[in-house]
Image (spheres, grey):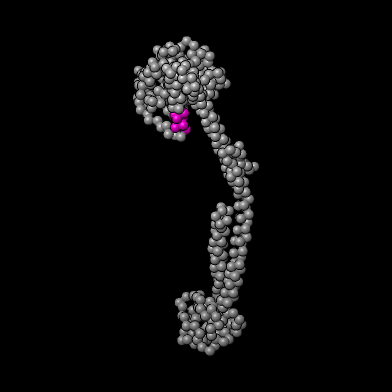
Amino acid sequence: MTGSLRFRVTALAALAVLGVLAVVGAGVTLTHRAVLTSSLDETLGDRADVITGRLRRGEPVERRDLPTDDVAVQVVAADGTVLVASPGLTGGRRWTQTPGTTTVRDGELPDGAGPARVLAAPVHGSTIYVAGTLEDVNQSTRALLRSLLVAVPVSSAVLAGLIWWLVGRVLRPVEAMRAEVDRISASRLDRRVPVPTTTDEVARLAATMNAMLDRLARSSERQRRFVADAAHELRSPLARIRAELEVDTAHPSSADLATTHASVLAQTGVLHRLVDDLLLLARGDAGALAVQPRPLDLDDVVERAAEARRGSRPIDTRQVRPVQVRGDEAQLARAVGNLLDNAVRHARTGVAVTLDVAPPGTAALTVADDGPGIPAEAREAVFERFTRLDDARSADDGGAGLGLAIARDIARRHGGDLTVVDTGRRGAHFLLTLPVAREEEGRIGRSAAG
């Protein structure tokens, strides 16, 4: 309990309030005493003014001018003779200070009667002493202090209880969220935390957590689908290899080892390409596929990739213009190669490739085929992993549905993108955009200025 946020907030608030009330209480006590003392000083001053006025007028000081309860008066001549005094002060000189001006100081009543405020005022060579007891001031101050010593802790305790209750109410939705999150597991990512009806920080936290859970659920679903699709794609060539080997083992006399070796080698190639694609995607998802950019001629990368694939379908690269970009040559070659493989696989007669600089400073590579094309509703789905628009197509046709996903991932890793564009012409048209190198931007600027 002592480690809970509720306890810490309550304890800190209670201590802060206790400290503030203690300071305020001390200030109130000192102010109260100062006010009472000032009032006593005014009373002493008024009494001294009455006696001073009589002495200056040459009138005798009467008995009624010498109070006996809480104020004592004594008039002392310059030679120390007590001229007049309150009852009990006539036995001799009681105060000896001879101020040049009127002063008020703390002192003592005669005969140890207690602390007092003593006013001394000179008049015609004599000194008037007026003393008032501080007992009432001290009693009133002590009574106030005792009240504060009770009221401050009690008020702090009541306030601490109120804060404990309020913090509990505020944190109740947080506790409900915590309990719900505790019940969420990898197999129950469909659960969501309750969102309070308020619009405060707790409600925004709940909405943010639910958005995070949505992302985790989608990511988990993609991962499960990816693993299932990868297992399926790996199983097919492995099953073919095993079947051929089992047939040759069961019928060794009729086995054609050369044909078996060629078939196994082809299936091994399929497995090798698929495993390479899976590892590339896995490294990209883990953030381990770092880009090592350097200036390179993208047109050279396109020409080399096209030359390596011209056997089955003609690839027209006459519209490829020199463009320089900054990127990882191996990764960009992989992306361009995947685009050409996809185009060659679907083309009926040939593939057209164009490369040029599009404003503002973007290298635009278009790979177009004259095949069946891509429906508008599937133009984003083709970039998902293991996606084949033709369900009858298999890995034997050269594609496992990973090439376009890898190409887009590489393009975005380089600050570009890969999309399907609608040109109104037959076939599929893929547009790969990349930022041009600074050297290329300078050359374009000089050409535009010329």
State whether residue 374 is above or below residue 207: above
Q: Is residue 350 left or right of residue 171?
A: left
In this orientation, which residue lies closer to the viewer: 94 or 366?
366
Question: Can you tell which quarter of the image residue 188 is in?
Answer: top right
Q: Residue at x 53, y 32 (%)?
A: 223
Considering the whole magenta stretch, tell me its main secondary structure.
helix
In this orientation, which residue lies closer to the viewer: 110 or 293?
293
Q: Residue at x 44, y 34 (%)?
A: 287
In this orientation, which residue lies closer to the viewer: 207 or 106?
207
State whether residue 157 is above or below residue 367: below
Q: Is residue 335 left or right of residue 9?
A: left
Q: Residue at x 57, y 41 (%)?
A: 185
Q: Position of residue 446 (x, y in %)?
A: 35, 21
Q: Position of residue 301 (x, y in %)?
A: 38, 20
State whether residue 272 is above or below residue 156: above
Q: Residue furthest bottom?
A: 91
Question: Can you tell which quarter of the image residue 432 is in?
Answer: top left
Q: Position of residue 37 (x, y in %)?
A: 55, 72
Q: Position of residue 423 (x, y in %)?
A: 51, 15
- Specify whether residue 133 is painted magenta: no
Asked if one can make out residue 311 in the rendered structure from this viewpoint, the answer is: yes
Q: Which residues are magenta?
A: 278-285
- Specify whether residue 279 is painted magenta: yes
